[in-house]
Image: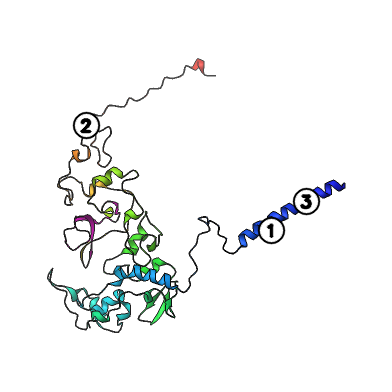
């Protein structure tokens, strides 16, 4: 190898080494930021919340339902406190067993809930609601941002593996409020965490936060149903649909699923599907179910009268005069043409 070739190889090596060192310095440089790809994104490591993080969380929480859960002592808020204010719950109070006896609450419809014999009311001034320390362990004057559940009976924190497990401590199978079970059965949001839709610290959420009802294939149907709650059409749990007429309900004036949970309750189902069965509301008169949509006619959906295809939401009657399908006849091949 001559001197010129050796010099060229040496210079080339120096260039490669310089580029490698430059790239390494960019990655390692303090403050240098690279745009993460979806595969690089992950949940931040838990730490003690800073004052700014604590203030933001408290502001969101203070406007949520978790900050105002007082039961007004209707029967035995010492038992309701097991979820509504765990720090106020007395696991040793015998009212818990009474509350699990359905006969203890039987009453004339509309009458006040009876007071349980062993129930001890908690004053509203002493009610703690669902505070930070139910889901986060205190650390000095702040909280650890990792999650765990305060077990009042054991007087200790119970580890949880996911947000869904944490929320399920109160939001599953309790008196008919099967939120977690419904979500786990949902083909639309299966395996999602509750906080994928709901605010981490209780900020309210709606379907339209993620879904624009006037976009995509269902836009025409959505526009024709302005007073129908999204879950009224997309529930796949078979719940009945009703028009909420309770003036104090946030769903007043909406068609929405209902479920028995203490009473018949307006229920934004969490068992959702993209598939819609219009016959749940628009079924023919005389069926087993009452007609929810009493006044809907064909012209409501077809204002000009004409259509170019059969409405796919209704079964088509069989043709009374079907055109016979001719049976093809086979002509034998002459033996002289067989090789």
Q: Quadrant of residue 320?
A: top left
Picture coordinates of residue 71, whole percent (x, y): 23, 75
Residue under pointer 3: 11
Dot 2 lies on which element? loop
Q: Who comes first in sequence, dot 1 or dot 3?
A: 3
The correct choice, above or below, for 200 with respect to 335 in the image is below
Circle 2: is it few (<14), some (14-19), or many (20+) Cα within 10 Å? few
Q: In the figure, is residue 41 to the left or right of 113?
A: right
Q: Quadrant of residue 60?
A: bottom left
Picture coordinates of residue 37, whole percent (x, y): 52, 55
Q: Who comes first in sequence, dot 3 or dot 2?
A: 3
Q: Which mark is in front, 1 or 2?
A: 1
Question: Contact, CB < 8 Å: mark 3 with mark 2?
Answer: no
Residue 242 in the magenta stretch? The answer is yes
Which region of the structure is painted magenta? 233-262
Dot 3 lies on which element? helix
Q: In the figure, is residue 168 to the left or right of 75?
A: right
Question: Contact, CB < 8 Å: mark 1 with mark 3?
Answer: no
Residue under pointer 1: 21
């Amino acid at each position: 190898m001559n001197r010129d070739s050796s010099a060229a190889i040496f210079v080339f090596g120096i260039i490669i080494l310089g580029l490698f060192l430059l790239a390494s310095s960019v990655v390692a440089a303090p403050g240098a930021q690279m745009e993460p790809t979806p595969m690089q994104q992950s949940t931040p490591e838990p730490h003690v919340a800073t004052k700014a993080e604590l203030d933001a969380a408290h502001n969101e929480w203070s406007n949520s339902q978790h900050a105002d859960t007082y039961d007004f002592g209707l029967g035995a808020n010492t038992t309701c406190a097991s979820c509504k204010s765990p720090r106020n719950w007395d696991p040793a109070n015998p009212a818990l067993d009474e509350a699990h006896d359905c006969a203890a609450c039987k009453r004339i419809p509309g009458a006040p809930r009876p007071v349980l014999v062993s129930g001890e009311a908690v004053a509203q001034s002493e009610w703690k609601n669902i505070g930070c320390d139910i889901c986060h362990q205190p650390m000095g004057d702040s909280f650890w941002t990792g999650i765990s559940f305060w077990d009042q009976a054991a007087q200790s924190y119970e580890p949880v593996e996911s947000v869904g497990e944490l929320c399920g401590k109160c939001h599953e199978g309790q008196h008919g409020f099967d939120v977690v079970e419904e979500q786990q059965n949902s083909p639309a949001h299966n395996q999602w965490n509750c906080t994928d839709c709901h605010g981490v610290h209780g900020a309210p959420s709606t379907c339209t936060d993620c879904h624009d009802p006037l976009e995509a294939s269902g836009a025409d149907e959505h526009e024709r149903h302005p007073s129908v709650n999204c879950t009224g059409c997309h529930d796949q749990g078979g719940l009945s649909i009703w028009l909420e007429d309770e003036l104090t309900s946030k769903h007043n004036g909406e068609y929405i699923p209902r479920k028995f949970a203490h009473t018949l309750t307006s229920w934004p189902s969490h068992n959702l599907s993209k598939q819609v069965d219009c016959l749940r509301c628009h079924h023919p008169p005389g069926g087993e179910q009452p007609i929810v949509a009493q006044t809907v006619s064909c012209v409501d959906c077809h204002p000009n009268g004409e259509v170019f295809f059969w409405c796919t939401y209704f079964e088509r009657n069989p043709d009374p005069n079907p055109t016979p399908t001719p049976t093809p006849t086979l002509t034998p091949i002459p033996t002289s043409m067989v090789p």
